[in-house]
Amino acid sequence: MKSDCHIHMVLDGIAWKDAIARHAHLPDEDFIRKTLQIYQEEGYTYLRDGGDRWGVGKAAREMAKEYGITYRTPLSPLCKKGHYGAFIGESYADLREYAAHVKRLGARGCDFIKIMISGLMDFDRFGVLTEDGLPEKEIRELVHIAHDSGFAVMAHCNGARTAEAAANAGVDSIEHGAYLDEDALQAMAENHTIWVPTLSTVGNLRGTGRFSEADVVKIFESAKENCAIFASMGGLLAPGTDAGAWNVPHGSKTEEAYLRQILGEKADSILSAGIEAIKSRF
């Protein structure tokens, strides 16, 4: 049975502002049920949501039981005030406020904590992120606070030094992970960090004309190469489409196809190990 270890039920893969507006007052039950039915028909039995502040993931978790799907959500992602993530999550000004958010999310029934610790890729400029990652010491404290509260930590993370810091801090999974280098990959492998590379968010941009084609291809090829290196190190890789991102529809088959192309005959064993690690922690 299939697993998608990174989706966003609140989004629809078309227009993020319109998708969010659909749930502005209450989670749209009809949309959620139609989406869960897609996953059910495709054979999915495990979904891990990246979170939202409107309660869409929480509503989906309750409905998912009817579709035979185990659904995990952090409820709302947490981002530092003034940094990437406020469009979908909740912001904190300092570590004290972050700890209060963690406590409140726990009381509301979150399955894990999601932190946003870097910017996004600039798809028109290979090698460039929209903003630098948080300082190493701060990342360590964010992970420590969540772990001390009994929660696994999912991190939106791009950039080699940010990923290395997160891995050494004991983060449970790194999502996206653009522009990693050997030191970052080694730290992730040694710390048993699960990497969910969400290749579909880049691979599915090819040929659309939305961004510089040459740069999109470079970003995609770089990510594929790093996945192969990480697998050769014995690293934990898990499939996650980031469904809901632009041109990544719910139930998309692209992520598994990309990873199987990279991993070859070892794909089944590598991905099974990554999925089992996700399920055991989250």
Image (cartoon, helix red, strand yellow):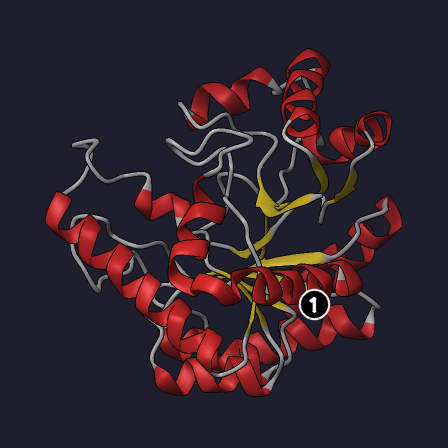
Q: Amino acid at mark 1?
A: Arg
Task: Assign the N terminus to one quadrant of the image.
Answer: top right
Picture residue at 62% right of the left edge, 79% below the top: 192
In this rendered view, identify the residue nearer to me: 207 or 11. 207
Q: Residues within 10 Å of mark 1 (few under 14, many from 20)?
A: few
Label 1 sits on residue: 96
**In the rendering, at what x and y percent does residue 31 appear?**
64, 16
Whether residue 188 is visible here, answered yes or no, is yes
Picture residue at 40% right of the left edge, 23% below the top: 15
> What is the secondary structure assignment of the residue under circle 1?
helix
- Is residue 132 placed above or below 38 in the rendered structure? below
Task: Assign the C terminus to one quadrant of the image.
Answer: bottom right
**In the rendering, at what x and y percent does residue 13 appear?**
44, 28
Picture residue at 39% right of the left edge, 77% below the top: 229
> Which quarter of the figure has residue 169?
bottom right
Q: How many marks?
A: 1
Whether residue 47 is visible here, answered yes or no, is no
Determine the residue located farthest toward the front in the rendered image: 265
**In the rendering, at what x and y percent does residue 158 appear?**
40, 64
- Is residue 4 placed above or below 25 in the rendered structure? below
Determine the residue located farthest toward the top in the rendered image: 30
In this rendered view, identify the residue nearer to me: 225 or 152. 225
Picture residue at 54% right of the left edge, 82% below the top: 189
Please state if 82 lies on the left or on the right of 50 as rendered. left
